[in-house]
Amino acid sequence: MQKPLNFKLVLLGESAVGKSSIVLRFVKQQFAEDRESTIGAAFLTQQMKIAEDLIKFEIWDTAGQERYKSLAPMYYRYAHAALVVYSVGSKDSLDRAVKWIEELKRQADSNTIIILAGNKSDIPDNTKQVANSDVEKLCEELDVSYHATCSAKSGAGINELFLKIGQLLPIQ
Ligand code: GTP
Ligand code: MG
């Protein structure tokens, strides 16, 4: 049996953007409309084959509610990658995501890879508040390694997202 390479991944972002839903989709191929808001943080693992390597993601799914904000550094410390999530239905959540990226740049390990994901791509176009072109510009300014949209609800873009994170990891 191949021994997996362990990597720590942290999810950050405003409450209700769908961080836990993304993790649940990736780890269990499930989705629930009536998810409870995360308290503190949740820990899950999932393995994935990237080319010849077997990767084990150790995933810290943090709570987005403001009252848990001060706990975040505990979870992004020593993280190989940070997945910052916003909802394409909420401009405010994109602003919050930018704040997280700025905090990571300031305080996280300089090797932590930052990925930005716009969740809820399944919602009707007339309810979307964030245009892809705006985000691409932001990503350049903020030096984000990768940006994509996804839907934990439909599953669109979820495996691709984690595959991309895996490919960005420093595998020797
Ligand atoms: P906190 O734990 O409070 O930080 O929130 P969270 O970011 O973990 O959000 P969560 O995964 O709990 O999802 C919040 C709500 O959005 C739930 O009602 C989900 O069903 C819904 N949701 C999550 N992902 C999607 C998606 O891709 N599309 C749609 N339409 N709804 C989604
Ligand atoms: Mg959650």
Image (cartoon, helix red, strand yellow):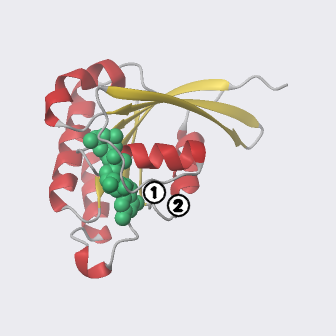
Please state which of residues 77 and 63 is positioned toward the viewer in this rendering: 63
Residue placed farthest to the right in the image? 1
Q: Say which quarter of the image contains residue 160.
A: bottom right
Element type where label 1 sits in the image: loop
**Residue 16, labelled with which disc?**
none
The residue drawn where x is 32% and y is 62% is 136
Disc 2 and disc 1 in contact, CB within 8 angstroms:
yes
Label 1 packing within 10 angstroms: few (<14), some (14-19), many (20+): many
For the residue pair 103 and 121, the one nearer the viewer reads as 121
State the image coordinates of residue 171 (x, y, percent, origin top left).
63, 30
- Marker disc for residue 152: 1
Q: Quadrant of residue 132?
A: bottom left
Nearer the observer, 22 or 6: 22
> Is residue 110 visible to the viewer in this orientation of the structure?
no
User: In the figure, is residue 37 to the left or right of 78?
Assistant: left
Kind of residue at badge 1: Ala
State the residue at coordinates (24%, 21%): 71
Secondary element at image label 2: loop
Residue 135 vs 76, above or below: the answer is: below
Query: Is residue 130 placed above or below 43 in the rendered structure?
Result: below
Q: Residues within 10 Å of mark 2 (few under 14, many from 20)?
A: many
Amino acid marked by disc 2: Gly
**Can the viewer see residue 7 in this picture?**
yes
Q: CA distance from mark 2 to mark 1?
A: 5 Å
Q: Position of residue 134 (x, y in %)?
A: 24, 66
Q: Is mark 1 within 8 Å of ligand 1?
A: yes
For the image, the number of numbered tags is 2
Q: According to the image, label 2 marks what residue?
A: 155
The residue sitting at 54% across, 51% down in the picture is 30
| Picture quarter with ligand 2 | top left
How far across and down, in percent of the image, does residue 133 sit?
A: 29, 70
Q: Nearer the viewer, residue 23 or 81?
A: 23
